[in-house]
Amino acid sequence: MKNINLKRVTLLVGAIAFAMFVYIIYESKMPSYLSSDPKACINCHAMNTQYATWQHSSHAQRATCVDCHLPTDSNISKYVAKSIDGWNHSVAFTLKTYDNTIKISDYGAERVQKNCISCHKSVTSTLVESADKYHNYDEQSDIEGGRKCWECHKSVPHGKVRGITTTPYNLGVKEK
């Protein structure tokens, strides 16, 4: 008799745990993070400003969040970065440990810089050739490792202010 009750309790606890897991997946919209849809980035309200300002920028016509913020060399490195970012974001947003001014991590900044250079190859190669005339770059390494593109191009593509509560270029999220 004791064995039967123990089995029932075990099954009940397992079913409850499974139901909670399914609920968490549903409530967090977890499957959307496996896609490249930029709307996945606004599952959390903290990214609404970044999404809206991107949506009204020239980059919205050619690049999604994934194109700029994740590695583009392989699916493995893309999903590793998504996993790391997803973990960090879920911890920060759940525990509310993020600042009103959202700042990109060093790891994220590395990826964005690499993707800027990759997408704008013709411009960056011209910068290196004309460094002495326009940008004061001493060598290629300044572009690849020193200065970041957004040091000069601050408003690309998210506007000038990075705060959650300050949105001068946020014209609202466009429904499509």
Image (cartoon, rainbow, N blue to C red):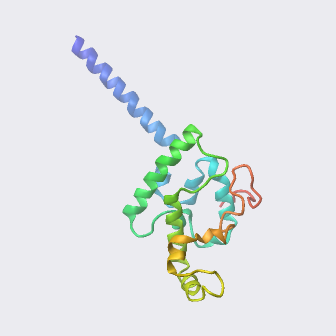
Depth check: give the residue in front, 141 or 30. Answer: 141
Give the x, y percent position of residue 94.
Answer: 55, 39
Give the x, y percent position of residue 2.
Answer: 23, 11
Residue occupying the point 56% across, 89% down: 129
Return the residue found at the far front: 138
Residue occupying the point 39% across, 62% down: 77
Give the x, y percent position of residue 23.
Answer: 47, 36
From the viewer's perspective, tell me whether residue 37 is left or right of residue 135.
left
Residue occupying the point 69% across, 53% down: 163
From the viewer's perspective, tell me whether residue 154 is left or right of residue 30.
right
Question: Where, quadrant-wise, is the C terminus in this rendering?
Answer: bottom right
- Residue 118 vs 45, above or below: the answer is below
Question: Where, quadrant-wise, is the N terminus in this rendering?
Answer: top left
Depth check: give the residue in front, 26 or 56. Answer: 56
Return the residue found at the far top: 1
From the viewer's perspective, tell me whether residue 12 is left or right of residue 51.
left
Instruction: Judge whether residue 27 can be spotted in this image.
Output: yes
Give the x, y percent position of residue 160.
Answer: 72, 63
- Residue 155 vs 46, above or below: the answer is below
Depth check: give the residue in front, 34 or 108. Answer: 108
| Numbered label tally | 0
Instruction: Judge whether residue 175 can be spotted in this image.
Output: no
Residue occupying the point 57% across, 43% down: 93
In terms of image quadrants, where is residue 175?
Answer: bottom right
From the viewer's perspective, tell me whether residue 46 is left or right of residue 22.
right
Return the residue found at the far right: 168
